[in-house]
Image (cartoon, rainbow, N blue to C red):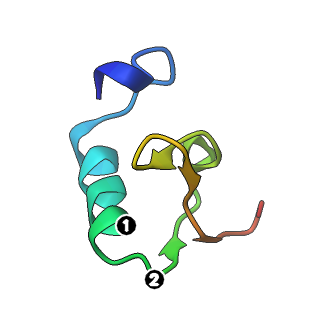
């Protein structure tokens, strides 16, 4: 969470990012545009199912 301090990652977002790390074959369904910034394992884009993606 400290890595994304400027974006304002909350605990719920951090949990979703961690789950995306544990289950790499899944996509995250969200309307939160911050997920365009978040990364799995610090460098991998998280696959999204979102109206902005």
The residue drawn where x is 46% and y is 85% is 25
When the figure is inspected, residue 4 is found, relative to residue 53, above or below; the finding is: above
Question: Between 3 and 50, which is closer to the camera in this rendering?
Answer: 3
The residue drawn where x is 39% and y is 17% is 5
The crowding category of the residue bearing disc 1, from other C-alpha atoms within 10 Å (few below 14, some 14 to 19, many at least 20), is: some
Label annotation for residue 40: none
Q: Residue 11: x, y in percent?
A: 22, 40
* Residue position for label 2: 26
Q: Residue 24: x, y in percent?
A: 42, 76
**Quarter of the rendering occupied by the C terminus:** bottom right
Q: Secondary structure at mark 2?
A: loop
Question: Between 15 and 31, which is closer to the camera in this rendering?
Answer: 15
The residue drawn where x is 30% and y is 19% is 2
Q: Earlier in the sequence, mark 1 or mark 2?
A: 1
Residues under labels 1 and 2: Cα distance? 7 Å
Q: Residue 1: x, y in percent?
A: 29, 29
Label annotation for residue 20: 1
The crowding category of the residue bearing disc 2, from other C-alpha atoms within 10 Å (few below 14, some 14 to 19, many at least 20), is: some
Residue 14 shown left or right of residue 24 in the figure: left
When the figure is inspected, residue 30 is found, relative to residue 34, above or below; the finding is: below
The residue drawn where x is 77% and y is 60% is 52
When the figure is inspected, residue 9 is found, relative to residue 49, above or below; the finding is: above
Q: Secondary structure at mark 1?
A: helix
């Amino acid at each position: 969470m400290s890595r994304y301090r400027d974006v304002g990652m909350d605990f719920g977002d951090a949990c979703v990012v961690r789950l995306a790390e544990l289950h790499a074959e899944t996509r995250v369904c969200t309307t939160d545009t911050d997920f365009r910034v978040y990364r799995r394992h610090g460098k991998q884009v998280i696959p999204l199912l979102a109206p902005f993606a």
